[in-house]
Amino acid sequence: MSQTTSTIPITASGEPVWELPSRGVVGMACLIIAEAAIFIIFVVAYIFYMGKSLSGPTPQQVLELPIFGTICLLSSSFTVHYAVSALRKDNLRGCILGLGSTVLLGAIFLATTAQEWYHLIHDHGLTITTNLFGTTYYSLVGLHATHVVVGLIMLTLAFGLALRGNVHEAHSEKLEVLSLYWHFVDAVWVVVFLVVYVIGR
């Protein structure tokens, strides 16, 4: 007895075969969702305690808009996107330029944050224990700065590997996963900037 083979097509002719999403992208998406939940808690706490400090200094007295640092950080989203796009085209030089620019812009942002904190602590005596504003401000902005540091460490490692020629087109997906984290950090800063420096003042 001969066996018959099914001739029913599984997919229609010409249609692309569906593939599972990248594990790296899925993992980063889960991490971003979890981190977003943490940031939401800190933002809500800042808004809840806004204006409830019993002593000064107040946000209106000490906070200034960090325009330059914000421009640098948001610009770094474009440079890291450029790095990923260049690597997809096997343009290592463009990738190095994009990564180097991203690291530089992120470092400048951190420097402006450190300068602001020095000004607040040294000139205005605002520490994390001064009042409710100090506690919520340093907690929220410090949480974001910590994420920037983590992102910069990973981007610097990628930049170093690219300089050594160890990054190729095949690694573009991994670099894209890293860029998703950096885009998240930038997006969170937009929320922090609006809540702390615009609404909070």
Image (cartoon, grey):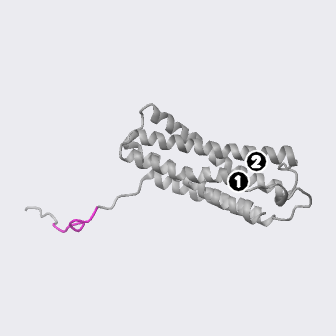
Q: Residue furthest front?
A: 68
Number of the label disc, if any, that sits on residue 66: 1
Q: Is residue 164 left or right of residue 130?
A: left
Circles 1, 2 touching at the beta carbon (< 8 Å): yes
Q: Is residue 182 magenta?
A: no
Tell me where residue 80 appears, x and y as whole percent: 50, 48
Q: Residue at x 47, y 54 (%)?
A: 25
Residue 121, above or below 41? above
The first of marks 1 and 2 along the sequence is 1
Q: Amino acid at mark 1?
A: Pro
The residue labelled by disc 2 is: 116
The CA distance from mark 1 to mark 2 is 8 Å
Q: Looking at the image, can residue 179 be seen?
A: no
Residue 199: image tag? none
Amino acid under label 2?
Answer: Glu
39 vs 130, nearest the viewer? 130
Residue range corresponding to the magenta coloring? 7-16
